[in-house]
Amino acid sequence: MISIGFIFQILGSLANFIIYCFNDDVYTWKLQSVLNRLGKSLFLDIINPLPEYPEGYNWTLEQQIRNRGYQFERHEIQTEDDYILTAFRIPGKLGEENKQRNKYPIFMQHGLIDMSGTWFFNKKEKSLAFQLSDQGYDVWMTNSRGTVPSNKHMKYTIKDHQFWDFTVHEMALYDVPANLKYILDKTKATQVIYIGHSQGTTQWFLANILDKDLTQYFKVFVGVAPVMSVNHMTSFLSQTLDAMNAAAIASEVSDSILYAPNIASFGSTLTHYLPRTLPMMSRNDVGGTSTKNLLFWNQMIHEKRLGYFNYGEKENMKRYNQTQPPDYDVQEIQ
């Protein structure tokens, strides 16, 4: 049942948003600009829809890979804290199954709320995963805990609060090492090339801070839109979420408000008439994450630092022996 306090919290957030609009001329201009562009885009796409569906429209990720002539494998990987992660692999092209495998492994990690479908928005010749496979690499695409492909745990289910008790910290502490070890064991390689997108780069940074021994197993790190700081974030979306205190409201509603596994069943159909890449994104790239992780990113924006999760002064004292959470020591990254 929705509490009176929660209703007042929503009303307060709406009031803050209205005040923000009236007091910030730049934000008001951004809001008007976004609404104008969105309205124009929707109008144009509805009266002039795509003449035909995009390549790969409504295909699953496995279908996208196999139908384009590549081998597809699905691997389950258990972390030290008992999450079951799923990784997808493109070991080569169809018809090459019996060829000796001595390809260099590439470890590709998606960003916030994404899943590994993020690497397949474009046509075959423009998709990074296919380009790397064509160049002779063994391509592994991992999925973070709390995404649709990685929604299992040895003890908990997605209905349990304990399942969603994580942020990018746990992804760095447990997911990155587990995926790395599994890939090395399977390929018999001694190092991998890591390609991270957005939060996927943050996971790599934090993993190297938390475990200095990991560095030796990465031959190359490639950051696509790398994130270590969000101090200067001024996008319309971030300002809007901040003004409405969206992260705090979300935490009152659900531990997993950003987990939407059913959107694939109708999202691609609804977005067929919207801007051109949305049908592909809604089918294979709504991965999900915990509300706690959303709070962590909101904390980074507010506190303007890369620090451990803030539980409040009392809990911080129990966990960190200080009232404020410590910063991650970025000087430890190698």
Image: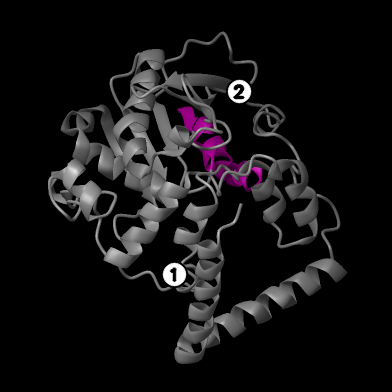
| Amino acid on which the number 1 mark rests in the picture | Asp
Which element carries disc 2, helix, strand or loop? loop
Residue 306 appearing in the image: yes
Relative to 206, residue 45 above or below: below
Magenta span contains residue 250? no
Where the C terminus falls, by quadrant? top left
Determine which quarter of the picture holds residue 333: top left
Which of the pair 301/269 is nearer the observer? Answer: 301
Determine which quarter of the picture holds residue 149: top right
Q: Residue at x 66, y 45 (%)?
A: 123
Packing grade of label 2 (10 A; few <14, some 14-19, many >=20) is some
Distance in Å between CA atoms under marks 1 and 2: 41 Å
Relative to 7, residue 55 above or below: above
Where in the figure is residue 11, as x and y percent of width and height? 55, 73
Relative to 171, residue 88 above or below: above
Judge from the rendering whether residue 168 lies leftward or rightward of residue 288; answer left or right: left
Q: Residue at x 64, y 49 (%)?
A: 281
> Which region shows up in magenta?
115-142
Which of the pair 256/300 is nearer the observer? Answer: 256
Mark identifier at residue 72: 2
Where in the figure is residue 55, as x and y percent of width and height? 75, 44
* N-terminal label among 1 and 2: 2
Q: How is the image coloured?
A: one colour
Mark identifier at residue 242: 1
Packing grade of label 1 (10 A; few <14, some 14-19, many >=20) is some
Residue 333 appearing in the image: no
Q: Residue at x 33, y 22 (%)?
A: 80
| Amino acid on which the number 2 mark rests in the picture | Phe
Which of the pair 250/9 is nearer the observer? Answer: 9
